[in-house]
Image (cartoon, rainbow, N blue to C red):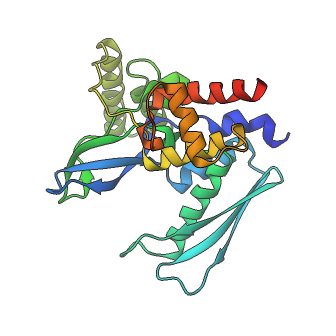
């Protein structure tokens, strides 16, 4: 088995309940937040353990002299190594462990794990500044969900099944609680899926940078201004920043770039 054999499994979307949300910026009155999707380090470890449990390793090297704990991480999967820098957040969470987790997630993106999250549209949500969390979390588009979740109630059922595996002891009270969860999932399946509110589907800064990196090898020899001119021609409107590109235009741009190579 080599890396190419498992690439699709590494890149597969995570169940919706494993995707977390953090604020990238807050509105002036701190009532709204631009949310960024991310996964935690344990999700990365679980993905690697499920695909190649004996063929991956991760090591870190502390970088001295930095204001916040910072490490260089090296993730090896099936003999291929990718490196990146991990930084701890400011405040009480600023530990070397947090920096190592950040490095693992960044290294994992080089293998495609969680990379699709950079292509998500911008999500603005109501923000509870007291609890430091969104009042409601965004609904992921179908393409950012595993296949089994792309039906009404699918995400809820997946989460409940995982709860059943961990929670189903002989305790009668707990069994009743599990049954309540399962009934809720079944009711969710019976109800029609509500239409999702319209979202701003332009790329985030991270998504724009990721697309720019992906187009680079497909458009060799073009400078940044020439790449934007080519994108403008393909999309039929002036593009001065990749953040003006919509998420549903990404695949078309990649296909056009590949066609350009063939031509």
The quarter of the picture where the C terminus appears is: top right
Residue at x 52% of width, y 70% of height: 87
Left or right side of 46 for 7:
right
Residue at x 71% of width, y 42% of height: 217
In the picture shown, does residue 68 fall above or below 220?
A: below
Left or right side of 187 for 158:
right
In the picture shown, does residue 251 fall above or below 223?
A: above
Residue 1 on image: x %, y %:
85, 39
Residue 143 on image: x %, y %:
50, 26
Residue at x 47% of width, y 24% of height: 236
Quadrant for residue 244, please give it: top left
Residue at x 52% of width, y 83% of height: 66
Residue 115 on image: x %, y %:
57, 44
- In the depicted view, which residue is nearer to us: 20 or 71? 71
In the picture shown, does residue 190 fall above or below 231?
A: above
Residue 13 in sight here: no
- In the depicted view, which residue is nearer to us: 193 or 171? 193
Residue 14 in sight here: yes
Residue, far bottom: 65
């Amino acid at each position: 088995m080599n890396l190419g054999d498992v690439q699709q499994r590494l890149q597969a979307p995570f169940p919706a309940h494993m995707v977390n949300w953090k604020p990238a910026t807050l509105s002036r009155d701190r009532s709204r937040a631009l949310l960024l999707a991310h996964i935690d380090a344990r999700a990365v470890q679980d993905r690697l353990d499920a695909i190649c449990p004996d063929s991956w390793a991760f090591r870190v090297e502390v970088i001295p002299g930095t204001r916040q704990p910072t490490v260089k991480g090296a993730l090896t999967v099936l003999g291929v190594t990718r490196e990146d820098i991990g930084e701890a957040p400011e405040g009480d969470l600023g530990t070397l462990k947090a920096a190592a987790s950040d490095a693992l997630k960044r290294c994992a993106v080089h293998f495609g794990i969680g990379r699709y999250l950079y292509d998500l549209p911008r999500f603005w949500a109501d923000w509870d500044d007291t609890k430091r969390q969104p009042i409601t979390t965004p609904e992921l588009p179908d393409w950012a969900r595993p296949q089994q979740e792309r039906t009404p109630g699918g995400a809820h059922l997946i989460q409940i099944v995982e709860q059943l595996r961990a929670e189903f002891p002989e305790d009668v009270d707990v069994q009743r609680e599990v049954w309540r969860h399962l009934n809720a999932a079944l009711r969710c399946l019976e109800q029609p899926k509500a239409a999702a509110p319209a979202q701003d589907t332009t790329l985030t800064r991270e998504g724009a940078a990721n697309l720019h990196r992906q187009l680079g090898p497909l458009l060799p020899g073009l400078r940044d201004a020439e790449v934007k001119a080519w994108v403008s021609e393909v999309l039929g409107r002036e593009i001065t920043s990749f953040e003006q590109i919509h998420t549903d235009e990404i695949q078309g741009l990649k296909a056009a770039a590949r066609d350009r190579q063939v031509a």
